[in-house]
Image (cartoon, helix red, strand yellow):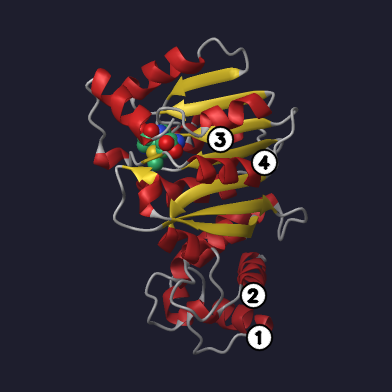
Amino acid sequence: MNRTDIRETLDEESIRLTKSLGQNLLHDQNVLRRIAKAGDLSPTDKVLEIGPGLGALTAHLLPAVSQLTAIEMDRRLEAKLRERFGEEPHFDLHHYDALKFFATGEAKDTDWSDWKLISNLPYSVASPLLVDLAGMPRGPKRLVVTLQLEVAQRLCAIPATKEYSKLTLLVGCRYEAGEMFRISPHCFFPEPRVDSACLTFHRRAKPLFDDALYPPFKTVVKRAFSQRRKMMRKNLKGGWPDDKIDAAMSATGLDVKIRAEKVTLVQFVELTQRLHDE
Ligand code: SAM
């Protein structure tokens, strides 16, 4: 679907796109092909697509895979998608809020480890969704996500930079960031005000910790970054006895004055293990 097709379809159906649902539809066919290529698809692949919109990316993915499950929150677009792809036996469409879908109920406990998630994500949903996917013990093996460039930079950030944040760690603990490419606003209709990027993640083949350690890891990271300018030790206070915090930091080789933004992922894992030790 090029820009004209999108405009015509929306006009025919009197659909006005909704800003709050992050409805910036991709129309650049080169970019869409490049996103599909980043999925490294094979005919046996199962793919999840969040927010298929009018199906611009879906059309590139569907012929290449054995199953495509799509989740779209807008009923008007859902109807158009059913018209366009409803006859395809391996296309499965759900009308859901993707955040609720993954955070609660069946999907949360489903084994997605055999799936790839390939999506042009609604911007407001991207960060919480990626954290939820990383929080699942059996999340998708590969993520190919289009998101705001600024969010992509936070996801790939290294310690001691302003981009290094909770998001970097909560996603990075389960996924390694791979290839990234920039996408200009001109590739979307309507054009967003910011640049975008497509980023590929691979689920860590060797987990950094046991599943049971994920909830305490999340707590430690959230507390550590609760006030970025403060020393991490002060932020952690109250969560654990002071002497336990001091002992855990010292055993991890962390200076008492260090700020969270300088602590590496591996150090956060070690710190969590030590704080969690009975
Ligand atoms: N994939 C399409 C494309 O590239 O042209 C559309 C991408 S657009 C950035 C985001 C899509 O996500 C929209 O279709 C929007 O309706 C849908 N959406 C927004 N919030 C959602 C949510 N919480 N759950 C599922 N879909 C959502």
Q: Of all residues shown, which one is farthest toward the top?
A: 87
Ligand 1 contact, mark 4 (Cβ < 8 Å)? no
> Could you tell me the amino acid type at mark 1?
Gly
Q: Which residue is mark 1?
A: 253
The disc placed on residue 138 is 4
- Residue 139 visible in rendering: no
Q: Which residue is mark 3?
A: 108
> Could you tell me the amino acid type at mark 4?
Arg
- Residue 171 visible in rendering: yes
Question: Dots 4 and 3: beta carbons under 8 Å?
Answer: no
Instruction: Please name whichever residue, 98 or 276, is drawn nearer the observer in this view of the structure.
Output: 98
- Precedes in sequence: disc 4 or disc 2: 4
Compared across the picture, whether 224 is left or right of 270 comes to left
Instruction: Please name whichever residue, 217 or 129, is drawn nearer the observer in this view of the structure.
Output: 129
Q: Secondary structure at mark 1?
A: loop
Q: Which residue is mark 2?
A: 267
The C terminus, quarter of image: bottom right
Compared across the picture, whether 188 is left or right of 274 comes to left
Q: Mark 1 against mark 3, which lies toward the viewer?
A: 3
- Precedes in sequence: disc 1 or disc 3: 3
